[in-house]
Amino acid sequence: MADAFIINGLRTFIGLKNKAYKNIPAEDLAAEVLKALNHKNIAQGIAPEMVIAGNCTSGGGNLARLALLKAGLGDDIPGITIDAQCASGLESIMTGYARIKSGLNSVVICGGAESASTCCVRSYNRNHPNHDPSKEDNSYVSAQFIPETFSENSMIMSADETCRKHGFTSDDLIFSAVESHEKAAKLADVIKSLALPVFGLEKDEGIRNSISKKFIERLAPVLPDGIINAATSCLFNDGAAFVTVADETTAKKSSSPVFKIRHAITVGGPRFLSPESMIIAMEKLIEKSGIDENEIDRIDYNQAFACLDLLYKKRFSKPSNAFGGALAYGHPYGASGAIVVLHLMKALEHFDEHYGIAAVPAAGGIASAILLERIK
């Protein structure tokens, strides 16, 4: 089977809901990145055969195809859209990896986009069992993830329950939130080359240069009797990110850093404790890859909640999220997996390291993880 490589990638700067990208739908954010990435690829003699995009909240349809047409990639380029919630962007890359490995394609652009500012507000049909005739408004944004409950707060409930099970305190969570912003602010210039200024935004809006423990302590929990608050969970964001996944022949044409995809995995975990699925994915990926755990230089993950840091540190001591995490720069759901991969690639390059893992836990107790090897 063919080997698969990541050779180029870009993202937008990440916006806060109803701020810089207030009126910009996800497909337009995606189109800008696709256009710029395609230009970069063509300059290296690399032509895409397909686009795969993650997206969760734009209301259906096929965002990948719509975005690539808006980007001017051409009628002959197919696009497919994947919804695996928070893991959508990483699953898009993994699908591209599988297509390269199987020989179906030679070059696939993979990633995702999300717009919390313009996402669709959905409503249950009156025939659906979840429709409540006593309510005038049956609208919702977050879908149902597990059979036992349907709540817009299901992910926060899962994070709170994880904290209770493992004995994580508010002070523990606050430290992670402060650290994330400090890292992001300190090394923002290192990853600036990954970000494309579009629609007037030239910085990640969520990063706070100075955020204090005292400020976070004053924030009330999101849920009554909860632990997670607005600073120890990610905010709502807009953004897009894509990478180019290619076979070895194509990768040799690239003048950019090249990363080989060594293995990838998707796992299921405890449905009520979805953050735990991330650790399961990391462990199974290492086991299945054949790479000794000691050879892994760093592990990056989507920091949707501060409790993920604490879970990670209970199991691993390797460096992680060198440029901060989603608590600082944000979590545009469909794009986040590709953002984590881009940041991991830059960290491996910046610190002159060899192997790294990118992982994303997702709603309902699943997680995806991918192992990269820096080639040049």
Image (cartoon, rainbow, N blue to C red):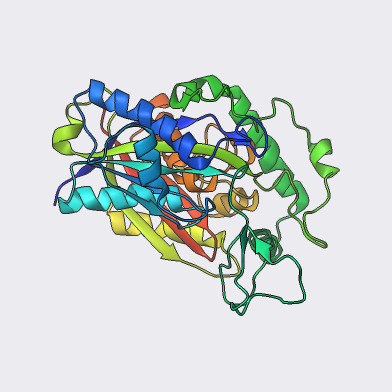
On the image, the x and y values in percent for residue 282 come to 43, 55
Residue under the point 45% across and 21% down: 193
Q: Is residue 231 above or below residue 272?
A: above
Q: Which of the image's four quarters has the C terminus?
A: top left
Q: Farthest right residue?
A: 218
On the image, the x and y values in percent for residue 374 come to 30, 34
Query: Image quadrant of residue 112?
Result: top left
The residue lying toward the viewer, choosing from 54 and 171, is 54
Residue under the point 37% across and 32% down: 71
Residue under the point 53% across and 46% down: 302
On the image, the x and y values in percent for residue 125 come to 60, 71
Q: Is residue 345 left or right of residue 207?
A: left
Query: Image quadrant of residue 83?
Result: bottom left
Q: Is residue 185 above or below residue 231?
A: above
Residue under the point 23% across and 43% down: 4
The residue lying toward the viewer, choosing from 67 and 154, is 67
